[in-house]
Amino acid sequence: MFFLKTLPSRQMIEGYVAKTREGDSDTIEQALSLLRNASLLIRQLNTYFRNNDFSQLRFLVLVVIDREPERNSLLASELAERLDVSRPVLSRTLKGLIADGLISAKADDRDGRAKQVSLTGSGKQKLSDLMPGYFRQICFFMNEQETEVFQQGQY
Amino acid sequence: MFFLKTLPSRQMIEGYVAKTREGDSDTIEQALSLLRNASLLIRQLNTYFRNNDFSQLRFLVLVVIDREPERNSLLASELAERLDVSRPVLSRTLKGLIADGLISAKADDRDGRAKQVSLTGSGKQKLSDLMPGYFRQICFFMNEQETEVFQQGQY
DNA sequence: TCGATTTAATTATCATGATAACTAAATCGA
DNA sequence: TCGATTTAGTTATCATGATAATTAAATCGA
């Protein structure tokens, strides 16, 4: 997250760039807009998931299992490859999803350490329950942005 | 943060959009790219600050006090207006910055509840120590992106 | 083939975000 | 003017991210 509500003015950025002799103002301004816009959207999505007693990470775990073509289960290690969170966080999150009956896990046949994870019926249901609202949040936000920041060429 | 390393394919998105009858694929794709790019940059910046025994929020507090024109102190409540974090987090962060001698606080003359916060010498020093590297991180990342995702029109 | 290394997953612990509940001061309004 | 409300800030607690260390299984190589 990027917590600055109002980005530094162009002048301010140019002042810092001149002082540090590092970077160029356009790039900095563009990057700060990127950070701020994304942070606003992330906030909105987190609120959406919280309101549905869920979390973005839980949702993405379901998505990643669901989107795997030709397979209905994934190893936890494969999930870890596809998701940019630490292994302990993934472990804990899977535990929660299992406890809630949204995924099921069984030991892998070939590798005694590994865990096969798949969506349960309620997992698939949860995913399709959440997806429309998720898209709605995104589109609502993007339309908002279009009429504000994006038009001003800040992004 | 948005944790999906590889965004859903265009086809995948179109599948979900069709199923949910919600949103349009271009907007979704654009938003997911926004989220993912920003998350990568935030990761890089967090790493930069951590390597310097600091944090993004601490840095932004210093920036916000520093950038205030014609003033050398701000009320904690004014900081809260400018930064998108909860009050308790701001409280805790200010406490840490005071303990490290980077800012100083004194009770406000007019309002017995309020706190005037200002940068100390080391606070100003810390800020100018960190700023060039901060800009360097940003520019490095943006150049990287230019040669990858941005060119592909995903953003 | 068996000791060393790597890999999969978890446990323990910390850092840093949030909300709810609180204290105390300021302000509002009948 | 004084009780009610609002505002500033903190404390207590929880949620969720991270890293370091651990366990156990698999694999590598002399």
Image (cartoon, coloured by chain):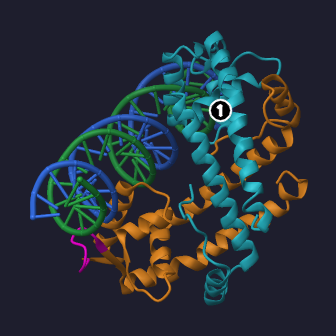
Chain colours: A cyan, B orange, C green, D blue
- Where in the figure is residue A152, as x and y percent of width and height? 77, 68
Q: Secondary structure at mark 1?
A: helix
Q: Nearer the viewer, residue B39 or B84?
A: B84
Asked if the stretch drawn in magenta spans residue B72, the answer is no
Q: Chain of mark 1?
A: A
Identify the residue shown where x is 58% and y is 17%. A102
- Where in the figure is residue B108, as x and y percent of width and height? 26, 77
The magenta stretch spans which residues?
Answer: B108-115
- Where in the figure is residue B59, as x and y percent of width and height? 48, 70
Q: Is residue B13 left or right of residue A121?
A: right
Position of residue B36 relative to residue A7, above or below, is above
Amino acid of disc 1: Leu
Identify the residue shown where x is 73% and y is 68%. A30
Label 1, residues with CA under 10 Å away: few <14, some 14-19, many ≥20? some
Identify the residue shown where x is 61% and y is 41%. A45
Position of residue A58 relative to residue A145, above or below, is above
Position of residue B146 relative to residue A29, above or below, is above
Quarter of the figure with residue B143: bottom right
Q: Nearer the viewer, residue A115 or A92?
A: A92
- Where in the figure is residue A80, as x and y percent of width and height? 63, 34
Q: Which residue is mark 1?
A: A60
Quarter of the figure with residue A73: top right
Q: Is residue B5 visible?
A: no
Magenta highlight: main SS: loop
Identify the residue shown where x is 60% and y is 72%. B134
Asked if the stretch drawn in magenta spans residue B109, the answer is yes
Q: Is residue B129 visible?
A: yes
Position of residue D26 relative to residue A49, above or below, is above
Quarter of the figure with residue A120: top right
Q: Is residue A6 left or right of residue B64?
A: right
The quarter in which the C terminus of chain B is drawn is bottom right
